[in-house]
Image (cartoon, coloured by chain):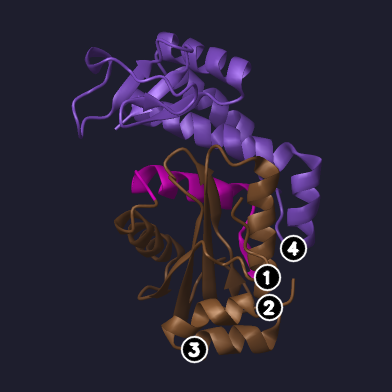
């Protein structure tokens, strides 16, 4: 099973420099990156799943971090993409601070719900420390995976 | 929206409902800062999507969901990813063409693309 704790960040697919300020545009950029990597079969279906998940509850978890996630039949294998924004993203109206780190967590439909939840929680756990978030924003792309893997479980 | 796309959306909605209704998932995600304040809207959306779906596909979906826990299963290389039976060429759509089909082996509703 693919998890994301400790040294198991093999599902981190890509680090994306975010160009947009709007949540929907940012999600489109990340889903397009996942689609071109062959992880997503139908980007529109995943976008709809992400929008629906946001309607159920915001995926902005504070401290400038958002973890949008979807478990979808259009996802072929577990993957995560980290988006970084210099300008910040307007994730939730009225939020105290803009989002600068977006970790998109994707799971295929056949992954059990609890396993998907664990992947999402692991992503939140990895981004919980302020110093880690700063390092992730500054790091070279190639160093991001190592930074995430260095987080204590 | 095509029937295939509607069924995929229904499946993803059911996946989210399962996640948001499971106490263990809710507890873990809740501790990480996620909330489920809009959960009731999902049930309404589900009713709307099912109503928009042709009756035949809706009942096949519900039957597949009840029997196997998931309404739709993918096809890869003409193989049903539920029972791993290879579909006959006549039952699989041409490459690049999406659509809904039934697995002759297990009766699952299949999404081919």
Asked whether disc 4 touches disc 2, contact meaning CB atoms under 8 Å apart, the reply is no
Q: Colour of chain A?
A: brown
Q: Colour of chain B?
A: purple
> Secondary structure beneath disc 1?
loop
Marks 3 and 1, how far apart in space?
A: 19 Å
Marks 1 and 4, how far apart in space?
A: 17 Å
Percent x, y for residue B75? Answer: 37, 29
Q: Which residue is mark 1?
A: A6
Percent x, y for residue B99? Answer: 30, 24
Q: Nearer the viewer, mark 4 or mark 2?
A: 2
For label 1, count other residues whose C-alpha is less than 10 Å away and answer few (under 14), some (14-19) or many (20+). Answer: some
Above or below residue A95? Residue B40 is above
**Discs 4 and 2 lie in a common subunit:** no
Q: Chain of mark 4?
A: B
> Secondary structure beneath disc 4?
loop
Percent x, y for residue B103? Answer: 41, 15
For label 3, count other residues whose C-alpha is less than 10 Å away and answer few (under 14), some (14-19) or many (20+). Answer: few
Q: Nearer the viewer, mark 1 or mark 4?
A: 1
> Secondary structure beneath disc 3?
loop
Q: Which residue is mark 2?
A: A151
Marks 4 and 2, how far apart in space?
A: 16 Å
Q: Which residue is mark 3?
A: A139
Q: State which region is magenta.
A: A40-61
2 or 1: tag closer to the N-terminus: 1
Marks 4 and 3, how far apart in space?
A: 24 Å
Asked whether disc 4 touches disc 3, contact meaning CB atoms under 8 Å apart, the reply is no
């Amino acid at each position: 099973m693919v998890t994301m704790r400790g040294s198991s960040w093999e599902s981190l697919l890509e680090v994306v420099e975010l160009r947009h300020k709007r949540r929907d545009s940012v999600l489109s950029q990340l889903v397009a990156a996942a689609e071109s990597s062959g992880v997503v079969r139908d980007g529109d279906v995943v976008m709809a799943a992400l929008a629906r998940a946001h309607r159920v509850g915001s995926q902005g978890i504070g401290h400038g971090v958002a973890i949008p996630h979807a478990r979808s039949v259009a996802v072929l294998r577990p993957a995560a993409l980290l988006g970084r924004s210099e300008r910040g993203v307007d994730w939730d109206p009225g939020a105290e601070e803009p989002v600068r780190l977006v970790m998109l967590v994707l799971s295929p439909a056949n992954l059990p719900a609890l396993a998907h939840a664990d992947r999402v929680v692991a992503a939140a756990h990895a981004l919980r420390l302020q110093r880690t978030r700063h390092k992730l924003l500054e790091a070279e792309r190639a160093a991001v995976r190592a930074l995430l893997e260095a987080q204590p479980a | 929206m095509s029937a295939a796309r509607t069924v995929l959306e229904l499946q993803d909605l059911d996946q989210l409902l399962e996640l948001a209704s499971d106490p263990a998932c809710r507890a873990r995600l809740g501790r990480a800062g996620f909330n489920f304040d809009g959960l009731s809207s999902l049930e309404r959306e589900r009713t709307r999507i099912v109503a928009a779906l042709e009756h035949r596909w809706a009942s096949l979906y519900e039957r597949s969901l009840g029997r196997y826990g998931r309404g739709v299963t993918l096809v890869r290389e003409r193989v049903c990813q539920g029972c791993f039976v290879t579909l006959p060429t006549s039952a699989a759509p041409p490459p690049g063409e999406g659509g809904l089909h039934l697995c002759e082996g297990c009766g699952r509703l299949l999404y081919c693309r």
